[in-house]
Amino acid sequence: MPNRTLKGRVVVEGHCKARALVSAKPISFLGGVDPASGKIIEKDHDLCGESVKGKILCFPHGHGSTVGSYVLYSLSKRRLAPKAIINQTADPVVVVGAIIANIPMMDQVDISEIKTGDLIEVDGREGVVRIVVKGEG
Amino acid sequence: MYLTKEEERIYDGERGWANQMCMRILVRLGELFDAAKLVRISSAHVSGVSYKTLGDAPAEFLEALANADGNVKVRATLNPQSLDTEYLGRKLEQSLREKQSNILKQFERMGFTESLTCTPYYLKKPKRDSHLAWAESSAVVYTNSVIGAWTNREGGPSALAAAIIGKTPDYGIHKPENRQPKALVTVDTVLKNPTEFGALGIYLGRLLRDGIPAIQGLGNTSENCLKQLSAALASTGMVNMFHFKRKSQAKTERLEKVCVETRDIKNTVESLSTREVSKPDLVFIGCPHCSLGEIKKIALLMKDKKVNKETEFWVCTSHYIKEKAGEYVAQIEKNGGHVLAGVCTIVSWTEKLGIRTIMTNSAKTAYYAPTMNKAEVTFRPLKECLTTALRG
C-alpha cells in the first residue's frame, strides 16, 4: 500500500519518524504541559495524562501565554520534548518554542488525516508528512 | 522576507548562538505574518519577569542567552516581578526570593534596565511615530493610542529577541494601513471616573475582538482614564489600539457603528465584581502602575486616616515613580499603607499571603484576579476603595 502523503509548510527544518500523538484541541504549553514530566496536565484536555516525549505531536494550534514557548525549551533540555510538531495553523507561542527548542515543525497540514499511534515521517526538505504505518485500532 | 547582508550573517550564526537564535525567532515570526523586512526599533519592553508566572522553564533559556553573550541593542525595559525585597519578600520563603532574583540577574546580564514596571512610558516616553517591540498588552494599547508610537502586541520571547537584535518584523500595526479604525464607537454616557473607563474597555474588548475602534464622546479625558481604558481593552480583546481624537476620525461612513449606553457601563461594572465584600483582605490600587499624580491623589485623599488593621492596602508603582513621590509615599506608609515598587498584584503570591478577597479600582485586575490569584473581587472607584481601607 502506498504511503499517504500530506502537504504542509515547513516552520522549523528537520527530518524524523515517530508515532503520532493527535489532539483535536489547542494546547497551552504554560499550565497545560508539565515541564518536569512532559505530560499533558490540562484538565478536560483530550490528551490529559499523555506524555509528549518522543512523539510527533499533532494539534490544531497553540494558545495561552507566550511563556509557553519556554516550556518547550525546558522539555527539550530534559529530553522530554516531542520529536516534531505538526499544526493546522502555526501561532507565535508554538513557533518560538519550536525554534528555541530546535524541534522540527510544520503547519498547514490536515491533521484530521492522522490518528494517534500512526507511524509518521516529517520531511522538512520536501515539506510533506508521510503516514508510513497506520496505527492499530 | 528580505534580509540585509548583516542580518543574514546573524541568521547564519556568524555573530554567535544568542544572536542567531533571536534572529531566527524574528524571521520566522515575520514569515508567519507576511512581513517583507525587519524595522529598527527604539526600545523593547519584555513581559514574563515574575517567577510566579514563569516557573522554572524560562530561567534556563535566559541563562543560555546571557552565557552566549546575548546583549540588548536598544533601551530594553522589564515588566514587574512577583515580590519586592522590602515588604512582600520578607513574608515569603527564601527559595522564591532566590528564584525570582536569579531571573532578574539573567536579564541584567543581558543589559536590561531593571525598570520592573508595566508603565515604562512614565520612565521614558517613546517618540511619536517611532517603532517599538513591546510586550505587556496594557502598555501596547496605551502607547499606540495615546503616545502615538507603533508596536505590535509582542509576547515575552519575541520582545526579548527584538531587544537583542534591535529590530522587529514589519507587519501588523507597524503598517499605516493597519492602524485605521474598523468601528465607530459613540459613548452616549458620561464616564464618571477611571474605573468606568476601565469598564468601557472591558465591554468594547469583548464586542470588537480585533477591530480598531474610533471612540467618540470621551470629552477631555485624563491620561489616567485612558490608561485604565487601554489596560481593560487589552484584557478582553485583541485590539492593539483605539482612536479618541476627532481629527483622526475623518472617514466614518463605512465603519461598523457601536453605541455604548449608561446601562452597558453599569452592567459591566457589576459583572466585574465576583462578590460584594465590605472588609476585603486587600485593597489594591496601581494596575497599571500608578503615576506620580495618582500617588499624590491617594495621599491627599487619605489625609491622616489610618488603614484598618484587618486590611492590607497596597499601592503599586515603579521604583522610578516611588522615588519621585517621596513625601506622598511617606504619608501613605505612615498611615499603614504599602507603596510597593516593581511588583504587580496579579503576578504576585497573594494566595501564599492568605489574601482571598481583593477590592480594586482596576478593571484589568478585576478581570484577572479570580483566575490568576484565585480571589474574589470587588470592583470600585478609587474613593470607595480608600473609604474601605480606612474604615476604622
Image (cartoon, coloured by chain):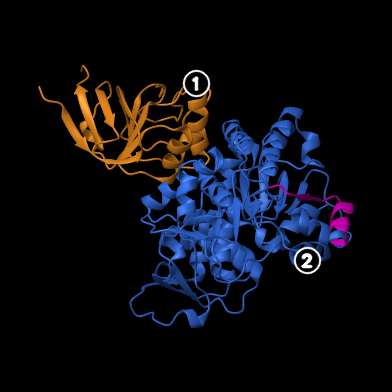
Chain colours: A orange, B blue
Quick check: B340 above or below B128? Answer: above
Q: Give the image location of residue B260, x and y in percent.
A: 46, 70
Image coords of residue B139 (percent x, y)? 59, 59
- On residue A37, which mark appears? 1
Rounded to the nearest angstrom, the CA distance separating label 1 from label 2 is: 50 Å
Total marks shown come to: 2
Magenta segment range? B327-344
- Is B310 situated left or right of A22 in this image? right
Callout 1 crowding tier (Cα within 10 Å): few <14, some 14–19, many ≥20: some
Write down the quadrant of residue B380 in the picture: bottom right
Q: Secondary structure at mark 1?
A: loop
Q: Is residue A63 visible?
A: no
Please give the chain letter of the residue carrying mark 1.
Answer: A
Which residue is label 2 attached to?
A: B297
Q: Is residue B301 above or below residue B277?
A: below
Residue B220 in view, yes or no:
yes
Q: Nearer the viewer, residue B199 or A28?
A: A28
Q: Secondary structure at mark 2?
A: helix
Q: Quadrant of residue B291?
A: bottom right
Residue B273, given in percent of the width and then of the height, sits at 58, 52
Mark 1–mark 2 CB contact (< 8 Å): no
Residue B341 counted in the magenta span: yes
Along the viewing direction, whichever of A9 and A59 lies nearer the viewer: A9
Taking depth in this image into account, of B151 and B331 the one nearest to the observer is: B151
Q: Nearer the viewer, mark 1 or mark 2?
A: 1
What kind of residue is marked 1?
Ser
Whether discs 1 and 2 lie on one chain: the answer is no
Residue farthest to the top, as pictured: A136
- What residue do we see at 39% from left, 81% from top? B251
Q: Nearer the viewer, residue B256 or A76?
A: A76
Quadrant including the N terminus of chain B: bottom left
